[in-house]
Image (spheres, grey):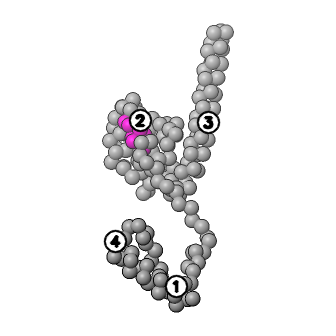
Amino acid sequence: MTTYNVEKRLDSKNQQNRQQQTVEQQVTAFKGRLAEEAALDPDIVNIANTFHLPGPNHLPLTDAMQDAIRESDVGPKLLRHFANNKAEVLRLAALSPVTQLREIGRIEAGILNKPQPVVKHVTSAPEPVKPLGGGSTVVDDDDKVPMQEYLARERLRAVERRKRS
């Protein structure tokens, strides 16, 4: 075996190792994004773990589509989109890998431009206490009522003050 062949094999092996490390880093990053998304969508973890298996969560994602989901900043949301739109997955799977990626980029842009839902935190605190009172009081701004009504209120207030004193 010549030195050239040995170096070529070594370069090939090093390139495979770098590719494997890159894939491992992408998977780790995707799992982190998946955990964050699970706070809003607990079912997404189940979909991510079972999309390739036969059953209700099965999605026929091509390798290029899986790579795009794994590498995307909104990968879990893409996965949810595909789980909700299986006909679109079938349409994309029939396209060339480059066209698939272009279409996924459009879907991703739509997801990024969509307003995010507000997360409501559930608390175990009891409902606020309703104060007991002598009845309901109507508080109106005296500047905004007609003059006749204002004068009638003032007469009532004057009568109330005389009764108290």
Q: Position of residue 26 (x, y in %)?
A: 58, 37
Q: Which residue, given by chain and number where applicable, does mark 3 sit on?
A: 25
The residue at the point 47 percent across, 53 percent down is 117
Q: Residues within 10 Å of mark 2 (few under 14, many from 20)?
A: some
Point out the tag, 2 or 3, that comes first from the N-terminus: 3
**Eyeballing the image, is 49 above or below 17?**
below
Point out the tag, 4 or 3, that comes first from the N-terminus: 3
**Can residue 153 be seen in this snapshot?**
yes
Point out the tag, 2 or 4, that comes first from the N-terminus: 2
Q: Give the numbered dot on residue 80.
A: none
Say which amino acid is labelled 1: Arg
Q: Nearer the viewer, residue 153 or 119?
A: 153
Q: Position of residue 43 (x, y in %)?
A: 50, 57
Provide the major secondary structure of the magenta segment.
Answer: helix
Q: Which residue, given by chain and number where applicable, does mark 1 sit on?
A: 161
Q: Which residue, given by chain and number where applicable, does mark 2 sit on?
A: 105
Q: Position of residue 143 (x, y in %)?
A: 41, 67
